[in-house]
Image (tube, rainbow, N blue to C red):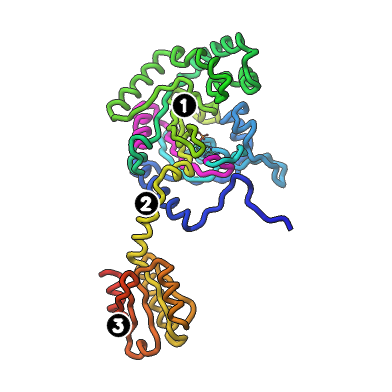
């Protein structure tokens, strides 16, 4: 029989992986909530039309990577490839943008049919943040500040810290002028373009400057720069953002080649780059402004900005060993393992186990067997608990239990109340 396997590029995670996962998740939730962001949860499945209209037909995501299928009604659906479009759909559907400003975050799986490798998956998690109704450049700066603080919370020292690549794509009018200039430039060198670039020349010429193909780099180097096409407002805005970043001591590189693969961005765009598992540079986090998107999806004119961390990539930056050690130390410091040394003492041990849990004790396990104390104690120490609480008929007759400190082997005969007192550290 063929072995059953997960879909390529989709991962299973177990408790030992998820300890660090949950810590990081908690840390991010806590951080963004302190900046005033509230959580949203949207369906994994959305109408295909949503991403075709927002992300854009010419983007890689829509043209090559969407998991698209027809359901039993014949509706074209997709597994959500990114979070922004879903948030806007939800906001519009529930009237959340009507005369209101919103700050949202999400932590959800995304699906893209990319070529899987380490750091690039077909199901991956994004921790994303979106702010609606704010046009002020101070918010752009605050978002970058918030991301910067993640690096310092994670203890990523200077050389390991992701580097901020920043660009401005200007407004629609300046983008149109830039687009024209690119078409003229690349048309002159049409024979030197690769297949992708030839296609983009018609559909989305901005994406050519984003090409990673080494053979194209010489040509791209001399292409017009978006920064020469910004109108006065966008240029002033970009200037002000940089002033704010400098004042906040946030290092950045202006990268005029950073255009992002999605169609909907304007003005501020950014990526924080890290060295990936394969050695090259990959984005740990990316985003930008998309002031026209909500209107183009049928809403009122609403400025907006958002970004997403690639959660698995963030995890790969974290010092997992240190976090696990910290976690082990914490749970071992309070864990209890309860042992009935005789069938008759099982009800008491079960009652005590429940009592400990009811007291909010973090980690309480009981041994389900009622004989072979040596093996029971072996399982107790393997569980990582600090305390083993045991009762045989003899102890029970005296109304007592045996409490063993598994760190040093010291053992005491205590009343149930005293035992609770000791392990609950009151
Ligand atoms: P994007 O929506 O493409 O701007 O991606 C935002 C972030 O998600 C990126 O900076 C990556 O960290 C992460 N990401 C994107 N695609 C993948 C993938 N296939 N596997 C893992 N992480 C990804």
Numbered disc in front, either 3 or 2? 2
Numbered disc in front, either 1 or 2? 2
Quadrant housing the C terminus:
bottom left
At a point 44% along the width and 15% down the height, the residue shown is: 227
Asked if disc 3 and disc 2 are in contact, CB closer than 8 Å, the reply is: no
Q: Which secondary structure lies at badge 1? A: loop
Disc 1/disc 2 C-alpha distance (Å):
41 Å
At a point 57% along the width and 20% down the height, the residue shown is: 208
Quadrant in the picture for residue 63: top right
Local crowd size for mark 2, using a 10 Å CA cut-off: few (<14), some (14–19), many (≥20)? few
Numbered disc in front, either 3 or 1? 3
Whether residue 310 appears in magenta in the rendering, the answer is no
Which of these two is toward me, 397 or 326?
326
Residue holding disc 3: 413
In the image, which disc is placed on residue 291?
A: 1
Quadrant in the picture for residue 212: top right
336 horizontally vs 115: left or right = left
Please, is residue 121 above or below residue 169 in the view?
below
Magenta stretch: give its range. Answer: 119-148
Disc 3/disc 2 C-alpha distance (Å):
36 Å
Q: Position of residue 338 (x, y in %)?
A: 40, 76
Q: Position of residue 230 (x, y in %)?
A: 44, 15
Q: Is residue 396 visible?
A: yes
Quadrant in the picture for residue 129: top left
Which of these two is toward me, 198 or 29?
198
At a point 49% along the width and 26% down the height, the residue shown is: 265
Residue holding disc 2: 322
């Amino acid at each position: 029989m063929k072995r059953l396997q997960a879909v390529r590029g989709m991962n299973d995670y177990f408790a030992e992986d998820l300890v660090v996962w949950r810590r990081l998740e908690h840390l991010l939730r806590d951080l963004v909530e302190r900046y005033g962001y509230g959580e949203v949860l949207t369906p994994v499945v959305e109408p295909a039309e949503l991403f075709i209209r927002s992300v854009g037909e010419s983007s890689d995501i829509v043209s090559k990577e969407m998991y698209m299928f027809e359901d039993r009604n014949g509706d074209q659906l997709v597994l959500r490839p990114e979070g922004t479009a879903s948030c806007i759909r939800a906001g519009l559907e529930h009237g959340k943008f009507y005369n209101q400003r919103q700050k949202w975050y999400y932590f959800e799986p995304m699906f893209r049919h990319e070529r899987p490798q380490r750091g690039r998956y077909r199901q991956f998690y994004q921790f994303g943040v979106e702010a609606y109704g704010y046009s002020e450049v101070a918010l752009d700066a605050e978002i970058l500040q918030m991301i910067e603080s993640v690096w310092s919370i994670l203890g990523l020292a200077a050389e390991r810290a992701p580097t901020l690549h920043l660009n401005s794509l200007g407004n629609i009018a300046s983008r149109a002028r830039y687009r024209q200039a690119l078409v003229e430039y690349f048309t002159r060198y049409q024979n030197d373009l690769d297949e992708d670039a030839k296609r983009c020349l018609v559909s989305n010429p901005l994406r050519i400057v984003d090409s990673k193909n080494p053979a194209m780099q010489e040509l791209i180097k001399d292409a017009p720069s978006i920064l020469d096409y910004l109108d006065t407002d966008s240029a002033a805005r970009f200037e002000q953002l940089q002033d704010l970043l400098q004042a906040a001591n946030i290092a950045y590189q202006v990268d005029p080649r950073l255009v992002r693969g999605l169609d909907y961005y304007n003005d501020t765009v950014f990526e924080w780059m890290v060295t990936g598992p394969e050695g090259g540079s990959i984005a740990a986090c990316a985003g930008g402004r998309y002031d026209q998107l909500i209107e183009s999806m049928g809403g009122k004119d609403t400025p907006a900005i958002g970004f997403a961390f690639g959660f698995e990539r963030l995890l790969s930056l974290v010092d997992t060993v240190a976090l696990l050690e910290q976690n082990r130390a914490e749970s071992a410091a309070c864990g209890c393992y309860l042992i009935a040394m005789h069938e008759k003492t099982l009800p008491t041990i079960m009652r005590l186990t429940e009592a400990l849990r009811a007291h909010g004790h973090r980690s309480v396990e009981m041994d389900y067997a009622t004989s072979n104390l040596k093996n029971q104690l072996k399982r107790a120490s393997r569980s990582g608990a600090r305390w083993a609480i045991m009762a045989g008929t003899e102890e029970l007759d005296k109304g007592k239990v045996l409490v063993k400190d598994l760190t040093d082997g010291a053992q005491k005969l205590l009343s149930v109340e005293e035992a609770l007192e000791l392990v609950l550290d009151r």
